[in-house]
Image (cartoon, coloured by chain):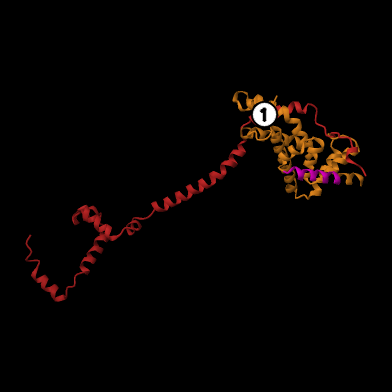
């Protein structure tokens, strides 16, 4: 049987000439170098991607809130709140009507709504016309 | 220069570069040969030796002097070797035997390996051992490190190391006889 102690201990590996003289300089130059750009990007991406996603969601949410129409915004306000505001604001009907730019269609719709609330029979109407005859009206 | 003096120089910003240069010069050969015996190839050993000292440089301020400086550096080198060999197997999905064959081929063909046939045969026998057992064998047989130091480097008990070395010698002698 071949015994280990019979084999002379010998280093069979070799290195290129001058290797150990150059190695400290090589290592020190690597230590002195700043981190490579690729490492910087990879390290930053793990923070940048979630940040961009959060900003994106924020912009989308903010935009969807901002582009609500006037009717949608008004629908979101309780009637009681509107009444309370109008009471506090001390506004007169004239103020409100003057502040609105009425067009012809609006006026016709308003007129229809007003007259549709009156329940006047034909006789009553004739009596009213007699009473308020055009001839009796004085200017 | 003693380790304490070396560490003082490294921890002083004005002499840090000079101190680190002295540290490399003091330990480069021990680290290189420790690594080379594990990875066989010079280029791989060169890369790993550089990585070891870069890690030493990064972590030297955290070295608490609970152990000797060389034990600490050896531990880093040992971990680098094991990580390298594991990566090599994972990267190519190579089984143990194929990495062993690759390293054995380098033993036969590399111009940077010389020696008599019996020494090459001993190296091939070592390649049959598991990586950790090969590390223990190298540190005991070639580097003549006491078991207490190997225990600190590997984190294994002295008793387990003695048993590991004994089994390694038996396997090697069986291979050499065959």
Considering only vertical position in the picture, is B129 above or below B70?
below
Rendered shade, chain A: red
Classify residue A95 as left or right of residue B128. left
- Residue situated in front as seen by the camera: B177 or A59: B177
Magenta span: predominant SS is helix
Considering only vertical position in the picture, is A41 above or below A61?
above
- Residue situated in front as seen by the camera: A43 or B157: B157
Classify residue B81 as left or right of residue B7. right
Q: Position of residue B173 (x, y in %)?
A: 88, 44
Q: Which residue is mark 1?
A: A29
- Residue situated in front as seen by the camera: B140 or B23: B140
Rendered shade, chain B: orange
Image point 79% across, 49% down: which residue?
B96
Q: Position of residue B144 (x, y in %)?
A: 80, 35
- Return the chain for callout 1: A
Q: Position of residue B143 (x, y in %)?
A: 79, 35
Q: Position of residue A40 (x, y in %)?
A: 59, 38
Image point 74% across, 27% down: which residue?
A22
Region rendered in magenta: B156-171
**Can residue B74 be seen by looking at this rendering?**
yes
Image point 24% across, 57% down: which residue?
A84
Considering only vertical position in the picture, is A102 above or below B148?
below
């Amino acid at each position: 049987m071949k015994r280990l102690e019979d084999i002379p201990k010998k280093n069979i590996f070799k290195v290129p000439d001058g290797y150990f003289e150059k190695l400290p300089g090589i290592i020190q130059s690597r230590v002195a170098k700043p981190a490579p750009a690729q490492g910087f990007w990879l390290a930053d991406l793990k923070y940048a991607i979630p940040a961009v996603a959060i900003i994106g969601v924020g912009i989308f949410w903010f935009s969807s809130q901002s582009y609500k129409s006037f009717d949608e915004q008004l629908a979101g306000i309780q009637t009681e709140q509107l009444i309370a505001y109008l009471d506090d604001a001390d506004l007169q009907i004239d103020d409100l009507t003057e502040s609105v730019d009425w067009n012809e269609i609006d006026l016709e719709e308003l007129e229809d709504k007003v007259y549709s609330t009156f329940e006047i029979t034909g006789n009553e109407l004739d009596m009213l016309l007699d009473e308020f005859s055009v001839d009796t009206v004085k200017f | 220069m003693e380790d304490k003096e070396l560490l003082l120089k490294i921890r002083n910003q004005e002499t840090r570069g000079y101190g680190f240069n002295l540290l490399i010069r003091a330990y480069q050969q021990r680290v290189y040969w420790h690594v080379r015996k594990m990875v066989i190839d010079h280029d791989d050993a060169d890369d790993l030796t550089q990585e070891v000292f870069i890690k030493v440089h990064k972590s030297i301020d955290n070295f608490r002097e609970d152990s000797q400086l060389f034990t600490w550096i050896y531990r880093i080198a040992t971990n680098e070797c094991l990580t390298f060999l594991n990566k090599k197997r994972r990267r190519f999905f190579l089984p143990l035997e194929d990495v062993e064959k690759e390293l054995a081929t380098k033993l036969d063909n590399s111009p940077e390996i010389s020696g008599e046939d019996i020494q090459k045969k001993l190296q091939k026998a070592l390649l049959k051992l598991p990586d950790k057992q090969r590390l223990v064998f190298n540190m005991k047989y070639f580097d003549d490190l006491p078991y207490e130091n190997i225990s600190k480097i590997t984190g294994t008990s002295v008793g387990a190391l003695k048993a590991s070395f004994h089994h390694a010698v038996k396997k090697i002698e069986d291979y050499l006889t065959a």
